Image (cartoon, rainbow, N blue to C red):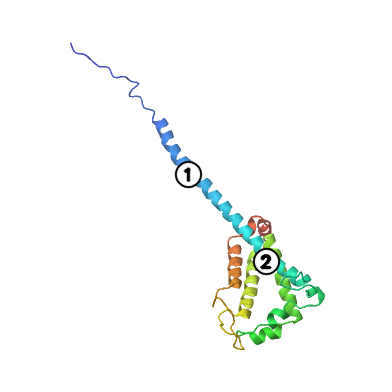
Amino acid sequence: MAVHQHSNPKAGLHLPFLRRNRTSSAPESAASVHTETHTGTRTVRAYAFASARVLMGFVFLWAFLDKTFGLGYATPSGKGWIDGGSPTEGFLGSVAVGPMESTFHAWAGAGWADWLFMLGLLGIGLALIAGVALRLTALAGTVMMALMWMAEWPPAQHLSDGTPSMSTNPFADYHLVYAVVLIALAAVSAGDTLGLGRLWAG
């Protein structure tokens, strides 16, 4: 007697839509994790640039305050701008090397040079801290840093009188680093985070 085996319909039952849902959930989960990671990375980067912006702003603003009021750091007490001191006379008057040595000596202590220098420090400092006008700030700051770089003239190994210049690098110094940072802050719109950049642009 032949035995007929009846196949179990349940064993062969397939639900493709369930399988598709299970397989599609993996890419969706991976995409979600990738998106969250990317967003987190962008957030960290934004706050890092914002922190650098505020710190750089404080560098310029503090230089203005110290030179104005003679707070006893780079500017001795009683030698501030409000006391009759000149913010440019000491630095530009002591330039001892470089192609613009005589020009800087002529500018040292001039009223227009003092006002231009101090307004530049104040404007750049406030703009960086507030996160506004970063492109103009980068331009003004880069010009200022370039002039100060030329005043110190790192390529020279000796001063005009023959004494060692004590330069530690023939090209790169903190003036160039500051200029690059200013340009980078403007390029990434660093004022949009912890600043008024979006409001300024809008």
Please say if 189 is above or below 75. above
* Spot occupied by residue 162 in the image (x, y as percentages of width and height): 59, 88
Q: Residue at x 74, y 79 (%)?
A: 112
Q: Residue at x 52, y 50 (%)?
A: 38
Please say if 69 is above or below 104. above
Q: What is the residue that sits farthest to the top in this orientation?
A: 1
**Split into 4 quadrants, where in the image is the C terminus?**
bottom right
Give, as a three-letter code, the residue at label 2: Val
Q: Nearer the viewer, residue 135 or 71?
A: 71
Q: Is residue 30 left or right of residue 156?
A: left
Which of the 4 quarters of the picture holds residue 153? bottom right
* Spot occupied by residue 84 in the image (x, y as percentages of width and height): 81, 77
* Spot occupied by residue 184 in the image (x, y as percentages of width and height): 58, 64
Residue picked out by circle 1: 31
Marks 2 and 1, how far apart at CA:
42 Å
Q: Secondary structure at mark 1?
A: helix
Residue picked out by circle 2: 59
**Split into 4 quadrants, where in the image is the N terminus?**
top left
Q: Nearer the viewer, mark 2 or mark 1?
A: 2
Q: Nearer the viewer, residue 93 or 31?
A: 93
Give, as a three-letter code, the residue at label 1: Ala
